[in-house]
Amino acid sequence: MVNGNFIQYCLKIQKVVGDKLPGEEAHLRMAPVNRPFKYIDQYTKDAGVLILLYHKKNEIHTVLIKRPVYNGVHSGQISFPGGKEENSDSNIIDTALRETEEEIGIDKEKHNIIGNLTPLYIPISNIKVHPVISYIPDTPNFKPDKKEVENIIEIKIFDLLNPESSITDQNFYENNRMIRAPYFKLGDIKIWGATAMIISEFIEVLESVSFSQ
């Protein structure tokens, strides 16, 4: 796919996102077993994460990060770049772009915003996550912040669209603990939890967009 076709493809995604989203039904397909239920309350924080699309070696990619191990609920997890909203942010898109620049070094001015997916509430951390989709026309030069990012994980979106990447077997070990959740398996990487739930909706959006048109 040449760069011009890549941009046209991103614009098609933009049209779908601006129309009607799959929403919570898509999230629940990849929800962990016995996911705790909790109401959004006055202490709930908003966060923005970024689904970045870019063109590399004639393939469309997105990027995930692996968090370092630390004393917290998201220790060692694989996620999209992003973080909590700050008072200085003009909106949740600004949050996602700022956090992405801080974590993996992509200048926030380079992004072309495609749109937002359905917000997802994460009970364990009492955070409402707003997924933002953007694209950049060139291949990024990642500069990860080692304090926040252990590894950069580049993923071809065609691999996400492969039905074999979605695993419904709900028992596996990660970081020496048993996880009961559906997950996406890409090589040795398992993507589960909130990130998998966001990807589930994103895949439905991608499936409605033709690569050939």
Image (cartoon, rainbow, N blue to C red):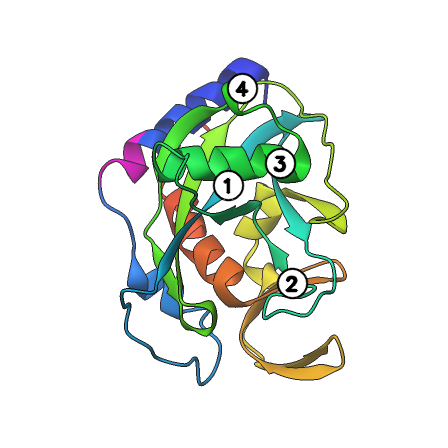
Residue bearing the label numbered 1:
51
- Residue 17 included in the magenta stretch of the image: yes
For disc 4, the neighbor class at 10 Å (few under 14, some 14 to 19, many from 20) is some
Q: Is the magenta stretch mostly helix, strand or loop?
A: helix
Q: Tell me if residue 145 is in the magenta stretch.
A: no
Mark 3: amino acid: Glu
For image coordinates 73% across by 38% down, the residue present is: 144
Q: Earlier in the sequence, mark 4 or mark 1?
A: 1
Residue 120 appears anywhere in the view:
yes
Q: How far apart are marks 2 and 4 (CA)?
A: 27 Å
Gap in Å between the C-alphas at discs 3 and 4? Answer: 14 Å
Q: In this view, does 35 lie to the left or right of 168?
A: left
Q: Position of residue 32 (x, y in %)?
A: 49, 76
Q: Which span of residues is magenta-colored?
A: 15-19
Disc 3 or disc 2, which is closer to the eye? 3
The quadrant in which the N terminus is found is top right
Separation of marks 4 and 1 at Cα, in angstroms: 14 Å
Q: Mark 2 points at which residue?
A: 77
Instruction: Name the side, left or right, on which 191 lies relative to 193.
Output: right
Q: Position of residue 108 (x, y in %)?
A: 53, 25
Amino acid tagged 2: Gln
Q: Residues within 10 Å of mark 2 (few under 14, many from 20)?
A: many
Q: Are marks 2 and 1 in contact (CB under 8 Å)?
A: no
Q: Marks 3 and 2, Cα distance to the nearest angstrom?
A: 18 Å
Q: Name the residue under label 4.
A: 110
Task: Report, in whole angstroms, how far the alpha carbon at label 3 lies from the one at label 1.
Answer: 15 Å
